């Protein structure tokens, strides 16, 4: 702050990041953002995390937002911003509040008709903002000093209220310019329901549920974005309904809850869950998204005539829709009106399958996916987060039983392979000390973003990465096979020493047997100063039966012939 109580735009932005709870930001330097980075570095409460590339930085910001509630990424113009775009699109799809901050061209360059580097060579420099506007809740360029405080504050406010990424572009000649210092403000504004719509939605839903012999509720992905988990638990307590979770909402409500019956995922649901959900007389899906992925190519048997769909800001019943009804308020008010009914829970208990415990480790037996996850199950506690990469890791991790306090993350809506490497970096930093991240990543996915292993070493974070080496893109094989699904094998375990470069504390080992895996896990847990990577050698066709089923149904949906008009 100067003698007139003014601060630079970069300093103002840094203060606001700290104020909303951000401690780290992910960046790659470039000449358009260097002065901005100088200003951000002056704030002692912020730590710059240097990523290997902007795509990985976007994935890291996504993971950080999942753990911390909000994140920030700083990129340079065009070559940096457009590289980060895919990560930001994933955060938009998954309702992750990420503030993307980009350096930009000098404000005089366009009016002076200057052709600039890092651009397509056309003198029109608003294109990056225009592109980001499609995958953010707000996208702005700071062109005038007097507008800077307003644009920064309102854009950050939108990020928090909408739970979506936003984009702020700071031209390279603006970052060190002075503006009035920020005044403390409350960014956490809660949108209220329309009272008439809320009252109507609650009455209609309560009447429908109370008239049903076997009602049931299902958690969905938007519960977290709307901070509605606690409201859902109130409804559970009042109703005593059985409840299942959609795959993207696994762990949002404790799986130790006595009314939990498993994951609902159409024909690849947890054993018994599919039958109970689809046979219910009325089902309330709270915050759920019905996509080709979550419905197995739209092959689930959810009957719209029995469905109450509570979205972020609407409630839809078979013959009526109530708009501007916030899901958290709806669930809390509904809890006051529903009658207890545990008939679906009793039905589930009648058909619930009891599985025999897995046999002890057979030290010399070749490792299989099933036996890998039986050992992983024993690792989970209240301080564990599981991160599952797109692919067979989804289906195997979905079978894990999460104890109270254990967390679970996947990218169900966007499904960008390679996401989990950067997300593991970001989540580990965002969750702080005391929480151990277990990441499950296929070899094909890992090859897209492997460089960020070196960033984990650099910042001494300690996730345990289980790299499943089966020689290709297994999820794509089960949707549509071809030579493009084969990859060049790497010495994945050997990469750790490459990235350590004689100074890092990363640890790795390749395992082929149950005994080797058991010993590797013990060593990994003792390594607290860097990442651990366990390369698990699997047969190429060793995948879950759920992936086979899901893949065939998604493939059938993809392969529908064109309609003849």
Image (cartoon, rainbow, N blue to C red):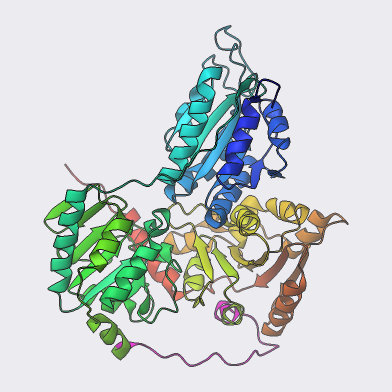
**Picture coordinates of residue 158, whole percent (x, y):** 43, 38
Q: Nearer the viewer, residue 451 or 473?
A: 451
Query: In the rendered structure, does residue 413 fall within the stretch colored magenta?
Result: no
- Quadrant position of residue 14: top right
Residue 112, above or below 120: above
The reply to whether the magenta stretch includes residue 357 is: yes
Which residues are the magenta region?
Answer: 351-373
Residue at horizontal 48%, vertical 93%?
356
Name which quarter of the figure residue 538 lies in.
bottom right
User: Does residue 489 show up?
Assistant: yes
Majority secondary structure in the magenta region: loop
Front residue of 469 and 103: 103
In the rendered image, residue 9, in percent from the top left (x then y), is placed at 62, 26
Residue 559 horizontal side relative to residue 467, left or right: left
Residue at the farthest top position? 112
Q: Position of residue 166 (x, y in %)?
A: 48, 37
Q: Residue at x 61, y 31 (%)?
A: 12
Quarter occupied by the N terminus:
top right
């Amino acid at each position: 702050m100067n003698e007139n109580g003014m601060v630079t735009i970069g300093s103002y932005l840094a203060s606001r990041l700290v104020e909303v709870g951000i401690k780290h930001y992910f960046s790659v330097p470039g000449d358009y953002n260097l002065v901005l980075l100088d200003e951000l570095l002056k704030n002692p409460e912020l730590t710059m995390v240097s990523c290997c590339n902007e795509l990985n930085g976007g994935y890291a910001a996504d993971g950080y937002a999942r753990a911390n509630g909000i994140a920030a990424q700083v990129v340079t113009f065009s070559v940096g911003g457009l590289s980060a775009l895919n990560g930001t699109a994933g955060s938009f799809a998954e309702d992750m509040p990420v503030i993307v901050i980009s350096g930009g061209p000098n404000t005089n360059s366009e009016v002076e008709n200057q052709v600039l580097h890092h651009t397509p060579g056309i003198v029109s420099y608003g294109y990056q903002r225009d592109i980001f506007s499609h995958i953010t809740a707000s996208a702005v360029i700071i062109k005038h000093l007097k507008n800077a405080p307003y644009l920064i504050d309102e854009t950050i406010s939108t990020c928090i209220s909408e739970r979506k990424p936003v984009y702020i572009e700071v031209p390279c000649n603006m970052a060190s310019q002075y503006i009035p210092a920020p005044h403390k403000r409350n960014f956490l504004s809660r949108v209220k329901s329309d009272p008439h719509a809320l009252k109507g939605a609650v009455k209609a839903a309560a009447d429908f549920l109370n008239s049903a012999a076997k009602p049931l509720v299902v958690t969905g992905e938007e519960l977290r974005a709307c901070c509605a988990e606690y409201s859902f638990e109130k409804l559970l307590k009042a109703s005593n309904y059985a409840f299942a979770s959609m795959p993207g909402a696994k762990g949002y409500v404790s799986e130790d809850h006595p009314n939990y019956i498993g994951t609902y995922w159409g024909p690849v649901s947890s054993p018994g869950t599919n039958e109970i959900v689809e046979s219910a007389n009325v089902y309330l899906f709270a915050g759920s998204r019905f996509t080709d992925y979550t419905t197995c190519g739209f092959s689930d048997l959810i009957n719209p005539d029995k469905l109450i769909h509570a979205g972020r800001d609407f409630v839809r019943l078979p013959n009526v829709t109530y708009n501007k009804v916030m899901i958290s308020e709806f669930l809390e008010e509904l809890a006051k009106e529903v009658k207890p009914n545990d008939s679906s829970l009793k039905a589930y208990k009648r058909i619930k399958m009891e599985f025999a415990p897995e046999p002890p480790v057979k030290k010399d037996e070749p490792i299989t996916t099933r036996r890998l996850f039986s050992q992983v199950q024993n690792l989970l506690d209240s301080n564990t987060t599981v991160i599952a990469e797109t692919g067979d890791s989804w289906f195997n991790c979905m079978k894990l039983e999460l104890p109270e306090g254990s967390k679970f993350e996947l990218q169900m809506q966007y499904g960008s392979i390679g996401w989990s490497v950067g997300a593991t970096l970001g989540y580990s930093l965002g969750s702080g000390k005391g929480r151990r991240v277990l990441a499950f990543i296929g070899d094909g996915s890992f090859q897209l973003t492997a460089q960020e292993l070196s960033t984990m070493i650099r910042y001494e974070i300690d996730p345990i990465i289980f790299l499943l080496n089966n020689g290709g893109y297994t999820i794509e094989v089960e949707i549509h096979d071809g030579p493009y699904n084969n990859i060049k094998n790497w010495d994945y375990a050997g990469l750790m020493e490459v990235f350590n470069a004689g100074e890092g504390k990363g640890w790795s080992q390749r395992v082929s047997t149950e005994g080797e895996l058991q010993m590797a896990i013990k060593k990994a847990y003792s390594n607290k100063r860097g990442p651990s990577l366990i390369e698990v050698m699997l047969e190429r066709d060793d995948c879950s039966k759920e992936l086979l089923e899901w893949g065939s149904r998604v493939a059938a949906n993809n392969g529908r012939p064109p309609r003849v008009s």
